[in-house]
Image (cartoon, helix red, strand yellow):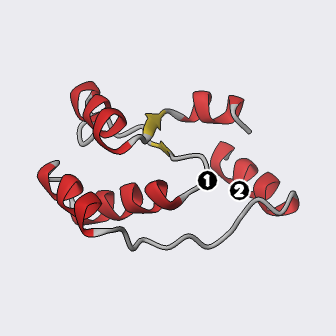
Amino acid sequence: MLGFAVLAHLAQTRRVKRISKKVDPGQARRIKILDLKPRDATFIKVALNSDESVFVSHDLEDFPDTVRATIRTDLGIDVIEATEGQARL
């Protein structure tokens, strides 16, 4: 229910927009080295192209602290959980 409320709020305040998943070859190589699932890699690419460079995920299996730290260091993306993301709205 929280997810719907967040999306509804974002839509009402015109904060929803289309973002490309295309990244430059260097960024694509760094993402490939992370050996993420294809869908997860897509979300990281979109986060790279977003204004805030933030990806919200509760998936600690695919994004453990070590992977989150590498993504932050190598790509400049903060991988956070929804409670932290909600505070950034």
Q: Residue at x 56, y 70 (%)?
A: 19
Q: Position of residue 36 (x, y in %)?
A: 20, 53
Which class describes the residues within 10 Å of circle 1: few (<14), some (14-19), or many (20+)? few
Mark 2: which secondary structure? helix
Which class describes the residues within 10 Å of circle 2: few (<14), some (14-19), or many (20+)? few
Q: Position of residue 16 (x, y in %)?
A: 71, 64
Quadrant (top left, top right, bottom left, bottom right) of the C terminus:
top right
User: Does the CB distance between marks 1 and 2 fall below 8 Å?
Assistant: no
Q: Nearer the viewer, residue 42 or 71?
A: 71
Q: Is 35 placed above or below 46 here?
A: above
Distance between mark 1 and mark 2 Cα atoms:
17 Å
What amino acid type is highlighted by mark number 1? Asp
Mark 1: which secondary structure? loop
Q: Residue at x 38, y 55 (%)?
A: 44
Q: Residue at x 61, y 73 (%)?
A: 18
Q: Is 89 placed above or below 7 here?
A: above
Q: Quadrant of residue 22?
A: bottom left
| Residue matched to label 2 | 7
Q: Is 23 placed above or below 53 here?
A: below
Q: Who comes first in sequence, dot 1 or dot 2?
A: 2
What amino acid type is highlighted by mark number 2? Leu
For residue 18, the mark is: none
**Left/right of residue 53 with respect to residue 88 in the rendered view:** left
| Residue matched to label 1 | 51
Q: Quadrant of residue 40?
A: bottom left
Q: Residue at x 64, y 49 (%)?
A: 3
Q: Quadrant of residue 72?
A: top left
Q: Nearer the viewer, residue 21 or 80?
A: 21
Nearer the observer, disc 1 or disc 2?
A: 1
